[in-house]
Image (tube, helix red, strand yellow):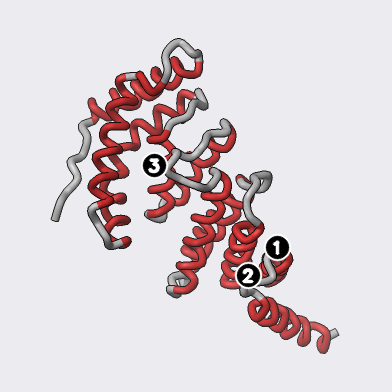
Amino acid sequence: MTTTKTASPARRHRQRIGARIASAAAAAKTAPLATAKPYELMCAKLDSDMRRLKQIQSVAKKIDIKRQLLPEYDAWVDGVLESGAGVQDDVLITVMIWRIDTGDFTGGLRIAEYAINHKLALPQRYQRTLGCLIAEEIADAGLRALAEKRLDDSNEQLRYSNALDHAAALTADADMPDEVRAKLEKALGLVYEQLSYNDKALGHLQRALALNPAAGVKKDIERVNRALRNKAAPETAAA
């Protein structure tokens, strides 16, 4: 099995400082980020890693490789975020997407928050807007986890609900197709149902239906409504 070579502490430090200096210079318009040597090196590495990924057909294996590669970008990401420069950085955005792909929602959404605040764009190879991609990728992750019955554990339920809530808050003002927003609302509703927060679940599912009548949530709404009625019945009888 191919193993990932871990960067030395000295190399990570150079990457982190390089990212801060290059981003700050680009923000100050003293030197474009694209011509900065540290950024050129990271782009070259990213190109090499992406070529490696393109040779793999298995989605599961691609995700495993991304998980191995991601630590090599941590120092760069930390330096960029620390700089607060807000300049376009395709390496940073790609790492955000890979983190979400591998289930590192906290790490991915940390970058997403920075990217949205600074109005960064996706690399040209992507057809969607940044907000649309964040909403859809997190929603898809939640819906897959539900379909694969991976949300029986309360910690996982909370992890996914936190990620979905965070994505919804970050993209609340983003323009995207109603179908994508509905997908996010559906995922939120179904995860909240797992947590037995049926009032919240119902609200999200109803919003999903309003946004997209073909969202496939009508039976879910019926089920959640039934659970709410069943819970209210004993309380009414006791009163």
Q: Mark 3 to mark 1: distance in Å? A: 31 Å
* Closer to the eye: label 3 or 1: 1
Q: Which mark is residue 215?
A: 2
Q: Is residue 160 above or below residue 193?
A: above
Q: Amino acid at mark 2?
A: Ala
Describe residue 191's horizontal placement relative to residue 90 as left or right: right
Name the secondary structure under disc 3. helix
Q: Earlier in the sequence, mark 3 or mark 1?
A: 3
Q: Is residue 97 above or below residue 142?
A: above
Q: Earlier in the sequence, mark 3 or mark 2?
A: 3
Number of other residues with Cα within 10 Å of mark 2, as a class: few under 14, some 14 to 19, many 20 or more:
some
Residue in the image at 50% along x and 58% along y: 159
Residue 58 picture quarter: bottom left
Q: Mark 2 to mark 1: distance in Å? A: 8 Å
- Residue 218 in the image: x percent, y percent? 67, 77
- Residue 60 in the image: x percent, y percent? 30, 62
Residue in the image at 43% along x and 73% along y: 148
Q: Mark 3 to mark 2: distance in Å? A: 30 Å
Q: Are marks 2 and 1 in contact (CB under 8 Å)?
A: yes
Q: Amino acid at mark 1?
A: Leu
Describe residue 223's horizontal placement relative to residue 156 as left or right: right
Number of other residues with Cα within 10 Å of mark 1, as a class: few under 14, some 14 to 19, many 20 or more:
some
Residue in the image at 45% along x and 39% along y: 124
Q: Which mark is residue 211?
A: 1
Q: Which residue is mark 3?
A: 95
